[in-house]
Amino acid sequence: MVIRQVIMQFTRALFFLAVLVLIQPVFLTASEHSEHASDSTESTQIVYQEPAQDGMSMKQEIKAHIQHHLQDGHDFHLYTDTETNTHVGFPLLVILLDDGVQVFSSSRFHHGESVAESNGNFYALHHGKVYKTDAAGTFEMRDGHVHNEKPLDFSITKNVFSIMAFALMLILLFTGAARSYKKSLVPSGSAKFLEPLIIFVRDEIAIPNIGEKHYKRFMSYLLTVFFFIWLVNLFGLTPLGINVTNSISVTFALAVMTFVITQFSGKKEYWKHIFWMPGVPVPMKILLAPIELLGVFIKPFALLIRLYANITAGHIVLMSLIGLMFIFHSWIGSTLSFGLSVFISFIELLVAALQAYIFTMLTALYFGSAVAEHEDH
Amino acid sequence: MEKLIEQFSVGLFFWQTILFLVLVFILKKYAWKPILDSVSEREDTIRESLESAEKAKKELTELQSKNESLIIEAKIERDALLKEAREIKDKIVNDAKGEAKEEADKIVKAAYAAIEAQKSGAIAEMKSEMASLSISIAEKIIRKELSSDEQQKSLANELVADLKLN
């Protein structure tokens, strides 16, 4: 527990550092930003539609790049050559619930540069989101926001595609490991590496938090959550630019699942501790009930924000530091930020595992409180 | 917060939920259950093996101490048996000796008695023989006396000489 606290302190300190680093480019770009802000209200142009050569500075290009990196996309975009304005990647399926179901390839958007037509409806991209437009693709802009109609978007976006790929990877990896047990009880191959991790989840996360009696029911969920988050976090650090755990929707989905499982496995004792806290006077019981009830929702909310914020912050810091290398344009500054970005990369490797651990641990803790039978307060 | 809500995508939430649930169920069936079962089975096997090894060790030491006590007992018994045997042997030998001595004594006694009897018999016989001899001598002397004096004398000398020889 002491080590965990130290690690938490350390990540907090890093977060502070990250914020400091983040503020710097904001100050640097502040002057130019204000100029751009004024004309962006009139312009219906999309940021990365603007070619780099007409006036877009290095700083803004980096900023746009980071923003783009953190966003989900309708095509699997690897990188853009701004000089020739060519995009490297592949298109994905767009599925819209609007006037029936509209299914078409994201290549029709031409990376947000053109309007896609499907069954007489016109759609265009703005900041990675699909909006219904007219044939010319005009956006109604008010106070810097698009006020066009937004169809329900169930597209296979970059993140959905990545989740599918990760799911497939996890299935192949772990069914492969499971198969090796059929031959002999002694682990071989990938199982040799994966088994200690599985046992770690069981012995260090599930059993201490849930208890010997009930932990078996939750093992499948805990193991899947742990390995899913870890694998996804690790892939987020690769130059492929896959970011799944920094989308609020993904962490929200995970937290909702934890929430639902917790409430459904909640026993009499659990509900009693929420609505009628034992061992305190009646006025306190009445006072505690709404607080405890609020806590039921705050717990998974903290879970989703924690994972989202940690991973997003890590990505922003890392990409900002990489961006700084180009901004400094001097060998001292660039070398320094290179060293820092290497350092942060290592920290991010730690954070990737740590966040998976924390998410799983807290999930196990909530499950444990739901199935606890005799708690002494 | 506003930005977070803006970023939220129903589609991604939907897909993540569906895909994750599918992932949990597939992995549960084909990975977690077999792996966890194998691991716990192996743990049980290890525990049982260790326990049985411990038990076997205990049994072995028990057996060893039992064997030792058996050997000691056997030794004691053997010693006792030997002692008894020796005693019996001694007794038998002593008894035999005594008996033999008695028998020998008896035999010797009998022999003495027989010798004595024979001796007395012989003496008696000799006596009777001598008596008859004396009588016959006396007869002869008497007969000779009847013929001449000289002859009587010579006969008497002869007899005396004979007697001396005897």
Image (cartoon, coloured by chain):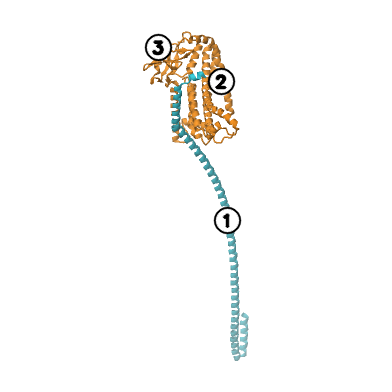
Q: Residues within 10 Å of mark 1 (few under 14, many from 20)?
A: few
* Residue kind at label 2, given as amino acid type: Phe
Q: Residue A64: where, in percent of width, then height?
A: 49, 14
Visible in this render: residue B121? Answer: yes
* Residue kind at label 3, given as amino acid type: Ala
Residue A349: which numbered mark, if any? Answer: none
Q: Residue A237: where, in percent of width, then height?
A: 49, 21
Task: Find disc 1 in the rendering and name its residue.
Answer: B77
Subunit ID for the residue under disc 1:
B
Q: Residues within 10 Å of mark 2 (few under 14, many from 20)?
A: some
* Residue kind at label 1, given as amino acid type: Glu
Chain A on-screen colour = orange
Q: Residue furthest left?
A: A119
Query: Do tags 1 and 3 sit on the same chain?
Result: no
Residue A15: which numbered mark, if any? Answer: 2
Q: Nearer the viewer, residue A129 or A151?
A: A151
Q: Residue A239: where, in percent of width, then height?
A: 47, 19
Subunit ID for the residue under disc 3:
A
Subunit ID for the residue under disc 2:
A
Chain B on-screen colour = cyan
Task: Find disc 3 in the rendering and name its residue.
Answer: A136
Q: Secondary structure at mark 2?
A: helix
Mark closest to the chain's N terminus, 2 or 3: 2
Q: Nearer the viewer, residue B24 or A173?
A: B24
Q: In the displayed structure, would residue B156 be above or below residue A109?
A: below
Q: Residue A122: where, in percent of width, then height?
A: 39, 15
Visible in this render: residue A368? Answer: no
Query: In the drawing, does residue A166 fall left or right of residue B100?
Result: left
